[in-house]
Amino acid sequence: MSDLPTDLYYASSHEWARLDDDGLITVGITDHAQEALGDLVFVETPSLDSSVEAGDACAVVESVKAASDIFAPVAGVIVDANGRLTDEPELVNTDPYGDGWIMRIKPEEPDLIEELMSAEDYEHMLAAEEED
Amino acid sequence: MRQDQLIFDEGRPGRRARGQAPSEPVDTGDLPAESLRTTPPILPEVSELQVVRHYTRLSQKNFSIDTQFYPLGSCTMKYNPRAGNALAMLPGFLDRHPWAATAQSQGYLACVHELQDMLRDVTGLAGVSLTPMAGAQGEFAGVAMIRAYHRARGDHGRTEILVPDAAHGTNPATAVMCGYKVRELPTDGEGDVDLQALREAVGPRTAGIMLTNPSTLGVFERRIRQMADIVHEAGGLLYYDGANLNAILGKSRPGDMGFDVIHINLHKTFSTPHGGGGPGAGAIGASERLLPYLPIPMAGRDENGYRWLTEVDCPHSIGRLSAFMGNAGVILRAYVYARMLGAEGMVRVAEFATLNANYLMTRLRAEGFQVWFPQRRASHEFIISLKREAKELNVTAMDVAKRLLDYGYHAPTAYFPLLVPECLLIEPTETETREELDGFIAALVAIRQEARRDPELVRSAPHDLPVRRLDEVRAARELDLCWTPD
Amino acid sequence: MPFIPHTEDDIRDMLAAIGVGDVESLFDEIPDGLRSGRLPPMLPALQEMQVTRLMHERATRDLVGPCFIGAGAYRHHVPAAVWQLATRGEFYSAYTPYQAEASQGTLQLIYEYQSMMCGLMAMDVSNASLYDGASGLGEAMLMAVRANQRVRSGRILVADSLHPVYRRVAETVVGNQGVILESLPLDAGSGVVDTAALGAIDDVVAVVIPQPNFFGRLEDVDRLVDWAHGGGALVIGVVNPLAMALLKPPGEWGEAGADIACGDGQPLGVPLSSGGPYYGFLCCRRSMVRRMPGRIVGRTVDLDGRTGYTLTLQAREQHIRRSRATSNICTNQGLVVTASTIHMALLGAEGLRRVAATCHARTRELTAALSTLPGVAPLHAGPCFHERALDLGQPAAPVLERLAARGILGGYALGQHDPALGDAILVCATECIEASDIAAYRDALAESLQEAA
C-alpha cells in the first residue's frame, strides 16, 4: 500500500495539498500517482503568477509511456514552482510529499482546501478503483 | 553479437570515397567571405567499402517483412512487391523534375490519373487526390476540408470534432491542428460506438466525426448507417480513417456507408513499403459535396492529354500540402500494386486478410488465450488480452511481446487500443501462409508455458537480439541525441 | 490473387477450424446493404511482365535531356551504393522502430542521421524527419509559436524571397491555428530582403529567413538574425542542406544563431523522382527540443550496459499526448532519410563541399554563357549559390516550351508567381551539368529566342 500522510488533503485526480503556516498551499502528486506513472523523465512546471481555478490543468508530468496533467486543487495564484524538478524529475518518485513538491498556490480562499478528501477518503477511493 | 560502432568512429582524418565527388579543386568564386562556412561540418570520413559494410550490418539488426512474420496490429505489414520498387525506380520516373512541362510528364500523369480513378471506385467516393504524404497528412486534409465546407456555407458555429475513445491518437491530434475541439465518444461492451452517447453529443457545434471502420478494436462498426444518419441530420460530416481499409477493401465501401471524406494509407492497404517509418502516402477521397475542397495538385485529363489541376482549376481547394505533388514514388508503387490486383484482386485482399485473422483468433482462443470480443468476428485483426497472465504469472503483454522477438516473430501491437488491459492487437495480413500462422500460435503457447515454468525468462526477454531491453528512462532523462567527438 | 499463398486445402481447413462454411460468412457482421455485390469496372489485372512493359513505356515517355530546372528540387549525382543499400529488405520493409530491440539498425542509422544534420546545420538537435521542406516549414512555425511564450500574437514574418510554394504550403498547415503570416519585403533590384528598410519589430513570434533564397541569392543572414532577436522574435532558417557544406550554417548566423533550421533534404542523395518522396529536416536549440514535432532517437544502454538506441521523448507525440501532441505526424520519410544518411557518409564534409562548389561554378558558367545572348541578362546583381534569375527580354513561357521541344528543360518560369517577372526564368546548374550541356543550352536558347522575336 502506498504512503498516505494524514496531515494532507487529496484530490480525486491524485494531487495532494497542504496549507502551510505562511498561508500558501503546497501541491504535489501522491505516492500512488507516482507509482502508477513510473519513473518520471520530465516535469513541466507551471508558469508563475498565473491565476488558476480549481481543476485547471497547470503542470505536466511525463514518464516514458505517459504524459499526465497536474490540476490545481484550489483556486488562486501560482507563486512558486519547484525548480529542482527541471533537472531532477525523479524527486517526484523518490520523495513525492517532500522534495518532489510541484507548486505553491496563494489561495483565494484557504478554507476551501477542506473540500478536498482526507487521507482516509482518498484511501477508500483507491480501494474502490482497485476493485474495478 | 559484435557491437557496431557509429559510422563516425570508423573514420580517419582525410579518408573519403574519392570516386563520388568532383575532383576539381574548390573555387568559391564570387561568394563573399562573410557568407562562407569557416569550419567544416562534422561528418564521417570513411571509404566506400566502410559505408557499404556498416549499413549492410546495420540493416541486419532490423526485423522486417522480408525476413520475419510481422503481425503488427493496425499497421498492415504485408508483402511489399519488389516489382513496385523496380518499376518506380525506372530512370524516366526518377529523373523527372517535378516542374517538368506537362508534355514531358504524360507517362507519370497517366499513372496518377488511373490510380485516382481506381481508388475512387474501390472506396465508393466521388473523387480522389493523391497529394497527402502520409496518413496523418491525409487526416489533416480531410478535417481541413470539413472545416472549409462549413465555412463556405457560413456555418461558423461548428467547433467540435467527435472521436471515439478507442481512436488512434492521430485523430484527436489532427482535429486540434485544424482548430477544432475534441469530444470523445464512449464504446459499448461489444466494441461498437455507444449510439445513445452519439445522439447526445451531436448538435449545432458538431463539425464532424472521425471514425475507423473496422475500428481499432478489430471489429466492424455494425450501426454505421445509423451513425451516419445521426451525424448528417445534425449537420456534421463523417471522416473515415483508412487505417483498417485492408479489412474491407472492395468488400464494403466507405462511400456507401455514408462517409464524406476518407484517407487511404497506401503504405498499408496498397502495399508500399513502410521503410522503417515512411514514406507513406495518404490518398484522400471525397464525396460530391466535398469535391471542391480536395488538396491540389491532382491529375486531370482533357482533349490534349493529362495535366495537373491547380489553384486555377480548383479555387476552393484547401491548398497545397507539399512543395510539389506528394510522394510520387510511393504513388507509383501503389499504382503497380493496384494494376497487378485489379478489381477482383482487391476483393481477395479483404477476404484473405479476414480469413487469416479469424483463423488465428479461433486457434488462439482454443489454446486458452482470452480473445477480447469472443462473440464478434475478427476483421483483419483482433485483440487478445493477457490480463489473466499478468495477474497470475506477473508476466505482462510487453514481456510476451519481447519474448516473441526471440522466437523470430515481430511483436504484435501492444497496449493499443488503450481501452483493453494488457492487450496485443494482432494483424496477420493476407500474404502470410497458414504454416506461418501455425508457427506463431505455437510460439505464443510455448511462451505461456515458459511464463509458468520460468517467468523471469520471459520478463527479461529478449535474450537473442543485438541488445536486451533498453533503459528508456535514461534515454529521456539524460538526452543523448547527437554524436560529438570526444 | 498475385500475393495470396493459400491453396484450396488451406482454405478448406482454415474455414473448418473457424467453423464457417465459406469466406463470405466471415463478413456477416457487415449489414447486407453495405456489402458491395461487385465493384465498378476497373482496369484489368496484369501479370508482372505486363505491368513491367507498361511502366517502361510510360517512364521512357517522360525521359528528357539535360535539366536546368531547380526551384526547390535538384539533380545531383547519387552514388550507386545509396539506394542499393536503402532498398535492402531489412530497411525497406521494416516498420517504425517502436520495438527497439528488433530495430537497432534503423535506430542507430537515425541517430547517425541526427548527428550529421546537427553537424551540417551547426545546431544542437535534429528530429528524425518530416514529410518535406515546405510542410516542415509549417511545422517549424507551429513549433515557434509553442516555444516563444512571450509572444501571443501568432504573427510570423516571412521573407518575400522564400520559395512561394513553401509559403503557400505553410499557410495550409498553420492556417487553422490562428497563425498570421506577414511579409518581409524584398528589394526588387537585388532580389534579397531589403535590410535598409527594416524597422523595429514588436510582438512577432518568429522571422523566416531563406538561405539561399528562392532566386538563389544570399541573404544578409547575420544582420537579419540580430535584428529579429533584438525584437524578441525567434528565427527560422530555411536552407538548402547541400549549400551548408559551403555556406555559413544557421547555428552560426548573427550573434546567437538561428533558433530553428529546416528545409528539404532532397539534395542529399534523393533523386528528383517527380517531386517525392523527399524529406523535411528540422533542427533546433537544445532548450526547444520538447517543443519539437516528430520522432527523435536517443542513445542509451540496455540491461547489460551495452549501448543501444531507442525512440525518446515520445510523450510529445500523438500516440501518447493525443489532442495535445506537438503535431499529428507519425509516419515520416524514414527510407529517404536512410538513403540520405548513407549519401552523407559517402560524400563526407569534403565531398559535399566539392559538390556545392562545383554547382556554384557550373551555374556561373551557365549564366555567363547565356548572358552573351542579346536581350538576356541576370535579373539581380550580386552572388548566387547554384541558381540565378535571368531576364530573357521577352515572355519566358513560350521560350521554355520551344526549349523543351529541343529536349532541354530550360528553367522555371518566374511569371507563375509574379506576373511582373513574366520575362524571367530561374536557371540552375548542378555538378551533373557539363560544358557541352551548357553549350547546347546556349545554342538552343539562341534559336528559341530568335523564333519568338
Image (cartoon, coloured by chain):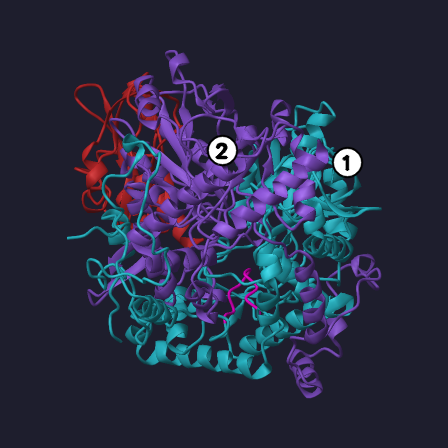
Chain colours: A red, B cyan, C purple
* Residue at image location 53% in from the left, 34% down from the top: C372
Q: Is residue B237 above or below residue C355?
A: above
Q: Nearer the viewer, residue B109 or C317?
A: B109
Q: Is residue C453 above or below residue C264?
A: above
The residue tagged 2 is C214
Please state the horizontal and vertical placement of residue C438, each as a whole percent of the image.
52, 46
Residue B201 visible in the snapshot: no
- Relative horizontal placement of residue B450, taking residue C7 as reference (left or right): left
- The kind of residue on which mark 1 rests is Glu
Residue C157 visible in the snapshot: yes
Q: Nearer the viewer, residue B145 or A19?
A: B145
Tag 1's secondary structure?
A: helix
Q: Is C158 within the magenta? A: no
The residue tagged 1 is B233
Please state the horizontal and vertical placement of residue B467, each as a whole percent of the image.
29, 68
* Residue at image location 63% in from the left, 56% down from the top: B331
Residue furthest toward the left? B486
Q: Which residues are magenta?
A: B70-78
Quarter of the view holding residue C373: top right
Residue B426 badge: none
Please state the horizontal and vertical placement of residue C131, each as a whole percent of the image.
50, 47
